Amino acid sequence: MSREPRCDRTFSRRDLLAGIGGLGVLGLAGCTQRNPNLDTSAEPTAAGSDGGGRDDDSGPLSGDIDIAGSSTVFPLATAMSERFEAEHPEVDTSLQSTGSGGGFANYFCTGQTDFNNASRPIQPEEEDQCADNGVEPVELKVATDALTVIVNNDNDFIGEGLTVEQLRQIWSAESDTETWADVNDEWPAEPLELYGPSDASGTYDYFNEAVIGEEGPGHRQDYSPTEQDRTILRGVAGSTYAMGYLGFAYYSQNEETVQAVPISEGDGDYVEPSLETALEGEYTPLSRPLFTYPKVSALRKEHVEAFARFWIDNATSREIVADEVGYVPLSESEREQMLGRIYAAVEGLSDDD
Protein backbone atom coordinates (compact mmCIF):
# COMPACT_ATOMS: atom_id res chain seq x y z
CA MET A 1 0.00 0.00 0.00
CA SER A 2 1.36 3.42 -0.87
CA ARG A 3 1.79 6.13 1.73
CA GLU A 4 -1.20 8.46 2.00
CA PRO A 5 -0.35 12.13 1.40
CA ARG A 6 -0.34 14.59 4.27
CA CYS A 7 -3.68 16.41 4.40
CA ASP A 8 -3.63 20.19 4.14
CA ARG A 9 -7.01 20.72 5.82
CA THR A 10 -7.16 21.62 9.52
CA PHE A 11 -9.67 20.31 12.01
CA SER A 12 -9.95 20.68 15.77
CA ARG A 13 -10.58 17.58 17.83
CA ARG A 14 -13.99 19.02 18.75
CA ASP A 15 -14.76 19.30 15.01
CA LEU A 16 -13.67 15.69 14.55
CA LEU A 17 -15.89 14.30 17.30
CA ALA A 18 -18.79 16.52 16.32
CA GLY A 19 -18.49 15.13 12.81
CA ILE A 20 -18.54 11.60 14.13
CA GLY A 21 -21.54 12.45 16.29
CA GLY A 22 -23.36 13.82 13.25
CA LEU A 23 -22.39 10.74 11.24
CA GLY A 24 -21.79 12.91 8.22
CA VAL A 25 -18.13 13.93 8.07
CA LEU A 26 -15.97 11.88 5.68
CA GLY A 27 -12.25 11.75 5.11
CA LEU A 28 -10.97 13.15 8.41
CA ALA A 29 -8.81 10.11 9.22
CA GLY A 30 -5.31 10.52 7.89
CA CYS A 31 -5.23 14.30 8.32
CA THR A 32 -2.88 16.00 10.74
CA GLN A 33 -5.05 17.26 13.59
CA ARG A 34 -4.17 20.88 14.39
CA ASN A 35 -6.33 23.08 16.59
CA PRO A 36 -5.55 26.79 16.71
CA ASN A 37 -8.05 27.27 19.54
CA LEU A 38 -6.85 24.34 21.65
CA ASP A 39 -8.16 24.31 25.19
CA THR A 40 -5.16 23.55 27.40
CA SER A 41 -7.11 23.78 30.65
CA ALA A 42 -6.34 20.12 31.35
CA GLU A 43 -2.83 21.30 32.33
CA PRO A 44 -0.77 18.62 30.61
CA THR A 45 2.57 17.69 32.11
CA ALA A 46 5.40 19.22 30.14
CA ALA A 47 7.63 16.86 28.19
CA GLY A 48 10.88 16.18 29.95
CA SER A 49 9.44 16.76 33.43
CA ASP A 50 10.00 13.20 34.53
CA GLY A 51 11.20 9.78 33.49
CA GLY A 52 14.78 10.66 32.52
CA GLY A 53 15.79 11.29 28.92
CA ARG A 54 17.68 14.18 27.38
CA ASP A 55 17.66 17.71 28.67
CA ASP A 56 15.82 20.20 26.49
CA ASP A 57 18.50 22.91 26.63
CA SER A 58 19.53 22.67 22.98
CA GLY A 59 16.76 24.91 21.66
CA PRO A 60 13.17 24.49 20.52
CA LEU A 61 12.06 21.00 19.55
CA SER A 62 11.35 20.59 15.85
CA GLY A 63 10.69 17.83 13.33
CA ASP A 64 7.99 15.53 11.99
CA ILE A 65 6.28 12.65 13.82
CA ASP A 66 4.31 10.13 11.76
CA ILE A 67 1.70 7.95 13.49
CA ALA A 68 -0.64 5.32 12.03
CA GLY A 69 -2.71 2.44 13.42
CA SER A 70 -5.75 1.88 15.57
CA SER A 71 -8.92 3.90 15.05
CA THR A 72 -9.69 3.24 18.73
CA VAL A 73 -6.49 4.93 19.92
CA PHE A 74 -6.80 7.69 17.29
CA PRO A 75 -8.85 10.14 19.46
CA LEU A 76 -6.37 9.78 22.34
CA ALA A 77 -3.37 10.25 20.04
CA THR A 78 -5.08 13.33 18.60
CA ALA A 79 -5.65 14.86 22.04
CA MET A 80 -2.04 14.28 23.05
CA SER A 81 -0.51 15.50 19.78
CA GLU A 82 -2.60 18.69 19.85
CA ARG A 83 -1.35 19.55 23.31
CA PHE A 84 2.24 18.68 22.44
CA GLU A 85 2.16 20.84 19.32
CA ALA A 86 0.70 23.71 21.35
CA GLU A 87 3.84 23.58 23.51
CA HIS A 88 6.19 22.82 20.61
CA PRO A 89 4.82 24.55 17.48
CA GLU A 90 7.84 23.55 15.37
CA VAL A 91 6.89 19.86 15.73
CA ASP A 92 4.47 18.58 13.07
CA THR A 93 2.52 15.43 13.93
CA SER A 94 0.69 13.47 11.22
CA LEU A 95 -1.94 10.89 12.28
CA GLN A 96 -3.62 8.23 10.17
CA SER A 97 -6.43 5.89 11.27
CA THR A 98 -5.58 2.65 9.45
CA GLY A 99 -6.51 -0.09 11.91
CA SER A 100 -3.96 -1.76 14.20
CA GLY A 101 -3.00 -4.50 11.76
CA GLY A 102 -3.08 -2.23 8.73
CA GLY A 103 -0.78 0.19 10.49
CA PHE A 104 1.73 -2.48 11.46
CA ALA A 105 1.76 -4.22 8.07
CA ASN A 106 1.68 -1.24 5.72
CA TYR A 107 3.36 1.60 7.61
CA PHE A 108 5.16 0.87 10.87
CA CYS A 109 6.90 -2.44 10.15
CA THR A 110 7.94 -1.15 6.73
CA GLY A 111 9.67 1.78 8.41
CA GLN A 112 7.37 4.55 7.21
CA THR A 113 5.99 5.72 10.58
CA ASP A 114 7.44 6.48 13.99
CA PHE A 115 4.53 5.12 16.05
CA ASN A 116 1.80 2.55 15.52
CA ASN A 117 -1.29 2.76 17.72
CA ALA A 118 -2.89 -0.58 18.55
CA SER A 119 -5.97 -1.82 20.37
CA ARG A 120 -4.33 -5.22 20.97
CA PRO A 121 -0.72 -6.39 21.44
CA ILE A 122 1.59 -6.70 18.46
CA GLN A 123 1.40 -10.19 16.92
CA PRO A 124 4.40 -12.52 16.35
CA GLU A 125 4.14 -12.24 12.56
CA GLU A 126 4.17 -8.44 12.90
CA GLU A 127 7.24 -8.61 15.12
CA ASP A 128 8.91 -10.76 12.47
CA GLN A 129 8.02 -8.28 9.72
CA CYS A 130 9.39 -5.42 11.81
CA ALA A 131 12.61 -7.35 12.52
CA ASP A 132 13.08 -8.11 8.81
CA ASN A 133 13.01 -4.37 8.15
CA GLY A 134 15.20 -3.35 11.09
CA VAL A 135 12.29 -1.86 13.06
CA GLU A 136 12.40 -2.42 16.83
CA PRO A 137 9.05 -1.65 18.53
CA VAL A 138 8.58 -0.60 22.16
CA GLU A 139 5.22 -1.50 23.72
CA LEU A 140 3.65 1.36 25.68
CA LYS A 141 0.26 0.96 27.33
CA VAL A 142 -1.64 4.26 27.12
CA ALA A 143 -5.16 3.53 28.48
CA THR A 144 -7.85 0.89 29.05
CA ASP A 145 -10.94 0.62 26.83
CA ALA A 146 -14.39 -0.90 27.35
CA LEU A 147 -15.20 -2.41 23.93
CA THR A 148 -18.86 -1.56 23.38
CA VAL A 149 -21.66 -3.46 21.64
CA ILE A 150 -24.22 -1.04 20.22
CA VAL A 151 -27.78 -1.34 18.86
CA ASN A 152 -30.31 1.08 17.40
CA ASN A 153 -32.17 3.42 19.75
CA ASP A 154 -35.48 1.89 18.65
CA ASN A 155 -34.39 -1.59 19.76
CA ASP A 156 -36.70 -2.17 22.72
CA PHE A 157 -36.66 -5.98 22.83
CA ILE A 158 -33.17 -6.90 24.08
CA GLY A 159 -34.15 -5.90 27.62
CA GLU A 160 -31.38 -6.46 30.18
CA GLY A 161 -28.73 -7.08 27.54
CA LEU A 162 -26.86 -9.92 25.85
CA THR A 163 -24.80 -12.76 27.23
CA VAL A 164 -21.33 -13.59 25.90
CA GLU A 165 -22.82 -16.85 24.61
CA GLN A 166 -25.45 -14.93 22.64
CA LEU A 167 -22.73 -12.69 21.19
CA ARG A 168 -20.79 -15.81 20.21
CA GLN A 169 -23.90 -17.25 18.59
CA ILE A 170 -24.43 -14.08 16.56
CA TRP A 171 -20.83 -13.42 15.48
CA SER A 172 -19.29 -16.89 15.09
CA ALA A 173 -18.28 -18.09 11.61
CA GLU A 174 -20.17 -21.32 12.29
CA SER A 175 -23.35 -19.46 13.19
CA ASP A 176 -26.54 -20.08 11.24
CA THR A 177 -28.16 -17.17 13.10
CA GLU A 178 -29.93 -14.92 10.62
CA THR A 179 -32.67 -13.23 12.63
CA TRP A 180 -33.09 -11.86 16.13
CA ALA A 181 -35.62 -14.64 16.76
CA ASP A 182 -32.83 -17.18 16.17
CA VAL A 183 -31.14 -15.76 19.26
CA ASN A 184 -34.28 -15.55 21.39
CA ASP A 185 -37.64 -16.79 20.10
CA GLU A 186 -39.36 -13.92 21.93
CA TRP A 187 -37.51 -11.41 19.78
CA PRO A 188 -38.60 -10.23 16.29
CA ALA A 189 -38.07 -12.56 13.33
CA GLU A 190 -36.22 -9.72 11.60
CA PRO A 191 -32.85 -10.14 9.87
CA LEU A 192 -29.74 -9.21 11.82
CA GLU A 193 -27.89 -6.31 10.23
CA LEU A 194 -24.30 -6.45 11.48
CA TYR A 195 -21.59 -3.78 11.40
CA GLY A 196 -18.07 -4.07 12.77
CA PRO A 197 -14.36 -3.44 12.27
CA SER A 198 -12.49 -5.11 9.42
CA ASP A 199 -9.94 -7.84 10.07
CA ALA A 200 -7.19 -5.18 9.87
CA SER A 201 -8.50 -3.79 13.17
CA GLY A 202 -7.25 -4.67 16.63
CA THR A 203 -10.83 -4.29 17.84
CA TYR A 204 -11.82 -7.13 15.48
CA ASP A 205 -8.94 -9.27 16.80
CA TYR A 206 -9.80 -8.59 20.43
CA PHE A 207 -13.52 -9.26 19.97
CA ASN A 208 -12.74 -12.48 18.11
CA GLU A 209 -10.45 -13.67 20.90
CA ALA A 210 -12.60 -12.54 23.86
CA VAL A 211 -16.01 -13.60 22.53
CA ILE A 212 -15.50 -16.35 19.99
CA GLY A 213 -12.25 -17.70 21.43
CA GLU A 214 -8.74 -18.23 20.10
CA GLU A 215 -9.50 -21.88 19.31
CA GLY A 216 -12.97 -21.12 18.00
CA PRO A 217 -14.22 -21.09 14.40
CA GLY A 218 -13.45 -17.42 13.93
CA HIS A 219 -15.48 -14.31 13.20
CA ARG A 220 -18.33 -14.49 10.70
CA GLN A 221 -17.66 -12.69 7.43
CA ASP A 222 -21.19 -11.92 6.23
CA TYR A 223 -21.33 -8.52 7.91
CA SER A 224 -20.45 -4.95 6.90
CA PRO A 225 -16.75 -4.47 7.77
CA THR A 226 -14.99 -1.11 7.93
CA GLU A 227 -11.88 0.52 9.37
CA GLN A 228 -13.91 3.64 10.22
CA ASP A 229 -15.90 3.69 13.46
CA ARG A 230 -18.19 6.44 12.18
CA THR A 231 -19.40 4.00 9.50
CA ILE A 232 -20.38 1.49 12.21
CA LEU A 233 -22.21 4.24 14.08
CA ARG A 234 -23.99 5.37 10.94
CA GLY A 235 -25.09 1.84 10.05
CA VAL A 236 -26.44 1.01 13.50
CA ALA A 237 -28.15 4.41 13.86
CA GLY A 238 -29.87 3.89 10.52
CA SER A 239 -31.55 0.52 11.09
CA THR A 240 -33.81 -0.70 13.90
CA TYR A 241 -32.45 -4.25 13.71
CA ALA A 242 -28.74 -3.40 13.43
CA MET A 243 -25.91 -4.25 15.81
CA GLY A 244 -22.24 -3.32 15.86
CA TYR A 245 -19.24 -3.02 18.16
CA LEU A 246 -16.46 -0.42 18.60
CA GLY A 247 -14.32 1.34 21.20
CA PHE A 248 -16.01 3.05 24.15
CA ALA A 249 -14.71 6.54 23.27
CA TYR A 250 -16.68 6.60 20.02
CA TYR A 251 -19.84 5.43 21.80
CA SER A 252 -19.38 7.96 24.63
CA GLN A 253 -19.33 10.78 22.07
CA ASN A 254 -22.56 9.44 20.50
CA GLU A 255 -24.70 8.29 23.42
CA GLU A 256 -27.79 9.95 21.99
CA THR A 257 -27.29 8.34 18.56
CA VAL A 258 -27.12 4.66 19.55
CA GLN A 259 -27.48 2.64 22.74
CA ALA A 260 -24.87 0.44 24.47
CA VAL A 261 -25.76 -3.15 25.33
CA PRO A 262 -25.03 -4.46 28.85
CA ILE A 263 -23.10 -7.76 28.76
CA SER A 264 -23.32 -10.82 31.02
CA GLU A 265 -20.83 -13.66 31.26
CA GLY A 266 -23.77 -15.93 32.06
CA ASP A 267 -24.03 -15.35 35.80
CA GLY A 268 -27.20 -13.29 35.50
CA ASP A 269 -25.48 -9.96 36.09
CA TYR A 270 -25.56 -7.61 33.11
CA VAL A 271 -22.83 -4.96 33.22
CA GLU A 272 -22.91 -1.75 31.23
CA PRO A 273 -19.70 -0.54 29.58
CA SER A 274 -18.28 2.46 31.43
CA LEU A 275 -14.99 3.84 32.69
CA GLU A 276 -15.89 2.69 36.20
CA THR A 277 -16.82 -0.90 35.30
CA ALA A 278 -13.68 -1.24 33.16
CA LEU A 279 -11.48 0.18 35.93
CA GLU A 280 -13.01 -2.10 38.56
CA GLY A 281 -12.65 -5.19 36.39
CA GLU A 282 -16.43 -5.72 36.29
CA TYR A 283 -16.89 -5.32 32.53
CA THR A 284 -15.51 -8.62 31.34
CA PRO A 285 -14.43 -9.94 28.96
CA LEU A 286 -14.65 -6.77 26.84
CA SER A 287 -12.36 -4.37 28.73
CA ARG A 288 -8.88 -4.26 27.19
CA PRO A 289 -5.58 -2.36 27.22
CA LEU A 290 -4.71 0.14 24.49
CA PHE A 291 -1.17 0.69 23.21
CA THR A 292 1.13 2.81 21.14
CA TYR A 293 4.35 1.35 19.72
CA PRO A 294 7.19 3.76 18.95
CA LYS A 295 10.24 2.38 17.20
CA VAL A 296 13.59 2.61 18.99
CA SER A 297 15.32 4.48 16.18
CA ALA A 298 12.62 7.17 16.30
CA LEU A 299 12.79 7.49 20.09
CA ARG A 300 16.46 8.40 19.76
CA LYS A 301 15.36 11.61 18.04
CA GLU A 302 14.89 14.29 20.67
CA HIS A 303 11.48 15.53 19.55
CA VAL A 304 10.07 11.98 19.24
CA GLU A 305 11.34 10.94 22.65
CA ALA A 306 9.87 14.12 24.13
CA PHE A 307 6.47 13.38 22.58
CA ALA A 308 6.49 9.78 23.84
CA ARG A 309 7.32 10.93 27.38
CA PHE A 310 4.71 13.71 27.14
CA TRP A 311 2.03 11.17 26.15
CA ILE A 312 2.88 8.79 28.98
CA ASP A 313 3.26 11.62 31.52
CA ASN A 314 -0.30 12.69 30.68
CA ALA A 315 -1.76 9.18 30.33
CA THR A 316 -2.69 9.34 34.03
CA SER A 317 -4.82 12.47 33.50
CA ARG A 318 -8.48 11.77 34.13
CA GLU A 319 -9.38 15.12 32.57
CA ILE A 320 -7.71 14.26 29.25
CA VAL A 321 -7.99 10.46 29.01
CA ALA A 322 -11.33 9.90 30.73
CA ASP A 323 -13.36 13.11 30.61
CA GLU A 324 -12.28 14.32 27.18
CA VAL A 325 -11.58 11.11 25.25
CA GLY A 326 -13.46 8.39 27.15
CA TYR A 327 -10.92 5.82 28.34
CA VAL A 328 -9.51 4.68 31.69
CA PRO A 329 -6.20 6.45 32.49
CA LEU A 330 -3.01 4.68 33.50
CA SER A 331 -2.17 4.22 37.15
CA GLU A 332 0.92 5.96 38.52
CA SER A 333 2.78 2.64 38.68
CA GLU A 334 1.92 1.91 35.03
CA ARG A 335 3.11 5.37 34.08
CA GLU A 336 6.47 4.80 35.77
CA GLN A 337 6.83 1.43 34.08
CA MET A 338 6.14 2.89 30.62
CA LEU A 339 8.55 5.81 31.19
CA GLY A 340 11.16 3.23 32.15
CA ARG A 341 10.68 1.48 28.82
CA ILE A 342 11.22 4.74 26.95
CA TYR A 343 14.37 5.45 28.94
CA ALA A 344 15.73 1.94 28.32
CA ALA A 345 15.07 2.22 24.58
CA VAL A 346 16.79 5.61 24.31
CA GLU A 347 19.80 4.52 26.35
CA GLY A 348 20.11 1.17 24.57
CA LEU A 349 19.52 -0.88 27.70
CA SER A 350 18.34 -4.49 27.62
CA ASP A 351 15.59 -5.95 29.80
CA ASP A 352 18.30 -7.29 32.11
CA ASP A 353 19.99 -3.90 32.66
Image (tube, grey):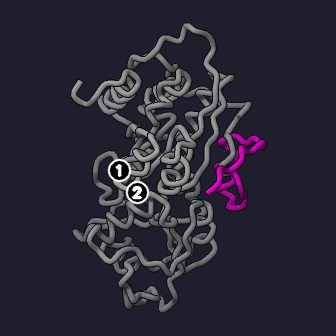
Looking at the rendered structure, the kind of residue marked 1 is: Ala
Pick the residue in front: 152 or 203.
203
How packed is label 1: few (under 14 Cα within 10 Å), some, or many (20 or more)? many
Provide residue 254's location: percent of width, then percent of height. Answer: 58, 57
For image coordinates 43% across by 32% down, the residue present is 296
Point out the stretch of residues depicted in magenta.
1-28
Looking at the rendered structure, the kind of residue marked 2 is: Pro
| Residue 278: image tag | 1
Pick the residue in front: 224 or 15.
224
| Residue 273: image tag | 2
> With 182 as the anchor, is 234 left or right in this view?
right
Q: Secondary structure at mark 1?
A: helix
Q: Are marks 1 and 2 in contact (CB under 8 Å)?
A: yes
Image label count: 2
Provide residue 191's location: percent of width, then percent of height. Answer: 52, 88
For image coordinates 35% across by 59% down, the residue present is 286
Is residue 227 shown above or below 86? Answer: below
